[in-house]
Amino acid sequence: MKTDPDCIFCQIIAGQMPCFKLLEDDDTLAFMDIYLASDGHCLVVAKDHYSTVFEISDDAFAAVSRSVARVQPLGKWRVHLVQSAVVQYHNQIVRKAPFLPSNRAQAEA
């Protein structure tokens, strides 16, 4: 598995940082964002590290897309393909209406 020791998402995937998991399979992890844009804000990442959408493999992109589709039934989501301060390709999924309480306290416990 490709990792970056300085990447917060790689640390979460390795279990070195806590998270509130929504879904995990062999290729992806979906978890609540501790810096919520809104209640129910979650992230879906490939377990291999890809810095940008231009570097991600077709198989990893497809796996992330499948996981987004599996998380989507939990509520009405807006899906964003993003490049943020965290240098790893990921999808942000933000609920349109309140759904889950803030999970920051749970993730930090």
Image (cartoon, helix red, strand yellow):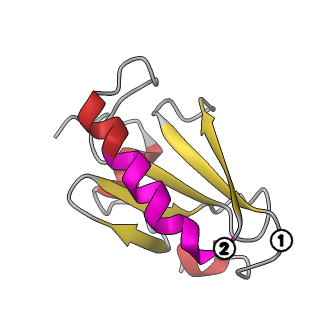
Contact between marks 1 and 2 (CB within 8 A): the answer is yes
Q: Main secondary structure of the magenta part?
A: helix
Whether residue 107 is visible: yes
Expressed as whole percent of the image width and height from the top left, the position of residue 18 reads 44, 68
Residue 64 lies within the magenta run: yes
Expressed as whole percent of the image width and height from the top left, the position of residue 81 reads 59, 36
Along the horizontal axis of the image, is 27 left or right of 6?
Answer: left
Q: Amino acid at mark 2?
A: Gly
In the depicted structure, whether residue 76 falls above or below residue 11: below
Q: What residue does disc 1 label?
A: 97
For numbered disc 2, what is the local secondary structure? loop
Along the horizontal axis of the image, is 24 left or right of 69?
Answer: left
Q: Please report the residue visible at 40 percent of the width from the left and 70 percent of the height from the top.
A: 23
Residue 62 lies within the magenta run: no
Give the mark nearest the N terminus, 1 or 2: 2
Q: Please report the residue visible at 31 percent of the width from the left and 34 percent of the height from the top.
A: 4
Label at residue 75: 2
Q: Which residues are magenta?
A: 63-75
